[in-house]
Image (cartoon, coloured by chain):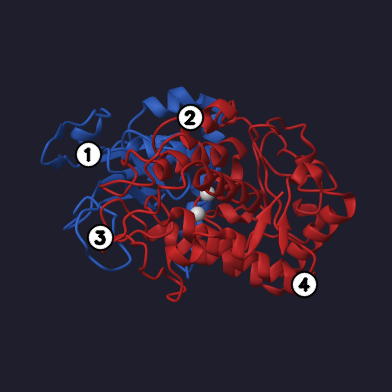
Amino acid sequence: MAVRKNQANLTATEKRDFVDAILELKRTGRYDEFISTHNAFIMSDTDNGERTGHRSPSFLPWHRKFLLQFEEALQSVTPSVTLPYWDWTVDRSPRSSLWAEDFLGGDGRSGDGRVTSGQFAFGSGKWPMNIRVDGRTFLRRALGAGVRDLPTRAEVDRVLAMTTYDAAPWNSSSDSFRNNVEGWRGPNLHNRVHVWVGGQMTTGASPNDPVFWLHHCFIDKLWADWQRLHPRSGYLPTTGTTNVVALNDTMKPWNDVTPADMLDHTRFYTYA
Amino acid sequence: MSRPSRRLVLHRGAAGLAGAVLAGPAAVAAAPAAHARPAADKDHPRAHGPAGHEMPEPFDEIYEGRHIEGWPEEGGHGGHGGHDGPHEGMGFVVRIDNDDLHVMENANGSWVSVVNHYETFTSPRGVARAAVRELNGADLVPVVTG
Ligand SMILES: [Cu+2]
Ligand SMILES: [Cu+2]
């Protein structure tokens, strides 16, 4: 059984294997396919139209499947690799080991925001932005510039206490656990972290920054934590609802996986 | 990628950036484009009726050296309805130096763009200005999907 660990607890070897597997996916073009798939949903998920990946109930199961697929791709390179998660309620500083030279590399430099350290720095030649929203071909970050602080544990706990998974109108205005985790309402959890990292992470092409996976892995863990806290609250909606994915509807782009299939993460991995 | 305006856009972007540095962002932002429509002079807060959201005003200005403009999409639905196609949910056209900035209206009447996708702005003009700041002189490129 694969165990997903807190990134702060990875050994030097585990960090290196994870980074190297990502670089190998980048080299073969598979990494960029994940970005363009994500783009398709970022562009088409709307509050009043069809919505699958974002601003809708299936935000959590869709990203769970998306991360599983990415993790499987990493494991096709190095079988022992699993996705680590970034608990940004604890590791909340640009000086965190997450941003060290031996892992994801550091903050962007002043002026153009270019990341200059680590394997994902443009200068390494291994991390070009091929799928992008603007002409810049280098990874950028601006840690803590777009918003000063990452969400706190108290804010996370406030959201985890919510009892209803999701609610009409099933979009960015819903008063629900899902929408508060996603961040369109309440203390702003998921969205705020994208903005805190800055650079590509604030854009629709956010998977260009490998921290995307560690961030979403923690969001995925929060869903599992919420399930444990509320054993009698399930995924909603359970019956067909216009424009959104109900419990037993299949999700694009896979068309063979439903939110129900994704509810129990322990079928695939556990969290340490 | 192959639009004829690309080279022009790059030049204008570079020239605009220099202008912004010389004049200061505030001064440049305050100067409307010569051909701005009168209705575009102010960033109107919008009335929110129970029947839905009013379409924001068109705008056309030079902001930090970049030409930003926006107008309701022809036959636009403000993101409402179940239309298929590439412009689903795109009820407002926003351009920066003639390149499309994909924008989207949220259920509460706020806006996001493909450049600032995880924070909301009160108007398409606000989202266009935020994109200019984020672009830092770079040109928009068409987004690859699927
Ligand atoms: Cu996403
Ligand atoms: Cu995200």
B119 relative position to B134: left or right: left
Characterize the local packing of mark 4: few (<14), some (14-19) or many (20 or more) Cα atoms within 10 angstroms: some
Question: A197 or A222, which is in the foreground?
Answer: A222
Q: On what subunit does the disc labeled 3 rest?
A: A
* Chain B display color: blue
Q: Amino acid at mark 1?
A: Pro
The answer for how far apart the CA atoms under marks 4 and 3 are is: 40 Å
Question: Marks 2 and 1, how far apart in space?
Answer: 35 Å
Chain painted in red in the figure:
A
Of helix, strand and loop, which one carries label 2? helix
Q: Residue A220 in the image: state x and y as whole percent.
A: 56, 51
Protein chain holding label 1? B
Is A29 situated left or right of B91 in this image? right
Q: Is residue B90 visible?
A: yes
Residue behind mark 2? A158
Q: Position of residue A100 (x, y in %)?
A: 81, 41
Going from the N terminus, do you reach mark 4 or mark 3 first?
4
Query: In the picture shown, does residue A255 fall above or below A205?
Result: below
The chain that hosts pointer 2 is A
Q: Amino acid at mark 2?
A: Arg
**Residue in view at x 56 percent, y 58 percent:** A132
Q: Position of residue B3 (x, y in %)?
A: 44, 66
User: Which residue matches tag 4?
Assistant: A77
Badge 3 crowding class, 10 Å Cα cut-off, few under 14, some 14 to 19, many 20 or more, is some
